[in-house]
Image (cartoon, helix red, strand yellow):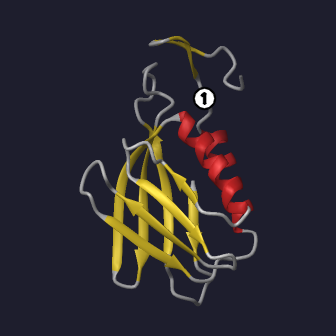
Amino acid sequence: MIHLADRPGTSGHSVVVRVLGRSLPGVLFGHDFLECEIVLTAESLGAAFPVTLLPEDLEDWEDALATLGARRFAMWLASGRTPSLKFEPDGHDRMSVSVHDGPSSGVTVTVPLFALPTGWVDEQRALLARVREVYPREVAETSLGAYVWRRDSGT
């Protein structure tokens, strides 16, 4: 869903959010939740943080991408229920990405990305669109705590 990495031949740093699948496939409550992992890689570091994404988290990522497209600071997953990500662009083609695992370990890991490729924001939007295509919203909440299957998964 997210793949931010230095250009080939540079530091090899990366920040990736991998979608592993639906949280509770076939169960109304939880079917549209996505089990994911946030993976950070640097020279001597490899870290992975499990996270469950809600449908609104995908919307929030879309908003964060709009902010990042304007080369401004953005936060994602800042609710406190999951690890959070902080994106700090420097106005050029560099950015620091920090993951804070407040709910579990309390650890914060920051990975500098020194040479993001041209068009990286559009690439992230394409990845988000692909996730939405593969895992469309199939459940609707008709009232607080009441869920039904959508008749048309495109609505």
Q: Residue furthest bottom?
A: 9
Kindly identify the residue that appears in the image at 63 percent across and 82 percent down.
115
- Identify the image quadrant of the C terminus: top right
Quadrant housing residue 123:
bottom right
Quadrant housing residue 150:
top right
Kindly identify the residue that appears in the image at 40 percent across and 85 percent down.
43
Kindly identify the residue that appears in the image at 71 percent across and 54 percent down.
66
Q: Is residue 148 above or below residue 30?
A: above
**Residue 54 point in image, percent of width and height:** 49, 36
Quick check: 106 left or right of 33? Answer: left
SS at mark 1 in the image? loop
Kindly identify the residue that appears in the image at 74 percent across and 60 percent down.
122
Residue in the foreground of this view, choosing between 117 and 102: 102
Q: Which residue is mark 1?
A: 137
**Residue 120 point in image, percent of width and height:** 69, 68
Numbered disc total: 1
Q: Amino acid at mark 1?
A: Arg
Q: Residue furthest left?
A: 105
